[in-house]
Image: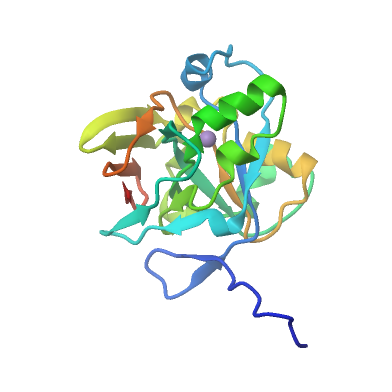
Amino acid sequence: MQFLFPPAAPVSVPVVGQDIRFPVHRIYCVGRNYEEHAKEMGFTGREPPFFFLKPADALVLVAPGETATMPYPSLTKNLHHEIELVVAIGTGGKNIAAADAHKHIYGYAVGLDMTRRDLQGDMKKQGRPWCIGKAFDHSAPIGPITPAADVPAINDAMIHLDVNGQQRQHSTIGKLIWNIAETIEHLSAAWELQSGDLIYTGTPEGVAAVVTGDTLTGSVEGLQGISVKIV
Ligand code: MN
């Protein structure tokens, strides 16, 4: 087959400790999935899960022990960090019951759902889609994926973010309103999940602005941490 121009290279994420890469299909994100974060955004924290997407090529790969760079995005004056656990789907499916969700998970990574909060806020007020606030270029830094079998305690893991060495976000995965399995149940009722899908599961409280020159250091217990400098 001949293409009119060269197709974009496939997006993939390295796997910890293996010479193999996880090819990315879609990036799903869960909104307001920690009660204290929902409250800081002005909501009660008790509502059904809801989802948005980012394009796969919004990923910024962060290698272990290195600091990746993310360009400060256009149009915003209020770029926020959201540290999140990312679930990597190995086997797709639709209408997956929470009890079966573990069979569909390949592994986990640390991610940042970077957000142009001012633009997202404008869209919310007008009842318009969040894309411009959430799905922009370089909006999804991610570390390498650890296979699920290597992190059996993920449901109780600590999640943490520092900016320039100062703590900004600190919680545990146990505080997810909709846990990993329930999230997969809800998500797979709305879309047929595919091998290669990533799910950003939501952020705990403490979201705030970063500026050019800031370095974000994020971790989830048991996974490779990430470091990202805004340039
Ligand atoms: Mn988020």
Regarding residue 195, the answer to whether it shows in the image is yes
Q: Quadrant of residue 18?
A: bottom left
Residue 105 drawn above or below residue 187: below
Regarding residue 145, the answer to whether it shows in the image is no
- Of residues 5 and 141, the one nearer the viewer is 5
- Of residues 147 and 32, the one nearer the viewer is 32
Q: Position of residue 228 (x, y in %)?
A: 33, 49
Q: Position of residue 175 (x, y in %)?
A: 47, 25
- Of residues 132 and 169, the one nearer the viewer is 132
- Of residues 207 and 223, the one nearer the viewer is 207
Residue 94 drawn above or below residue 162: below
Which residue appears farthest toward the front when viewing the image? 75
Q: Position of residue 148 (x, y in %)?
A: 49, 53
State the count of labels.
0
Q: Position of residue 5 (x, y in %)?
A: 68, 80
Q: Quadrant of residue 209?
A: top left
- Residue at 59 percent across and 71 percent down: it is 10
Q: Which of the image's four quarters has the N terminus?
A: bottom right
Residue 36 lies left or right of residue 23; in this view the side is: left
Residue 137 lies left or right of residue 50; in this view the side is: left
- Residue at 40 percent across and 51 percent down: it is 71
Which residue appears farthest toward the bottom when viewing the image? 1
- Residue at 41 percent across and 27 percent down: it is 207
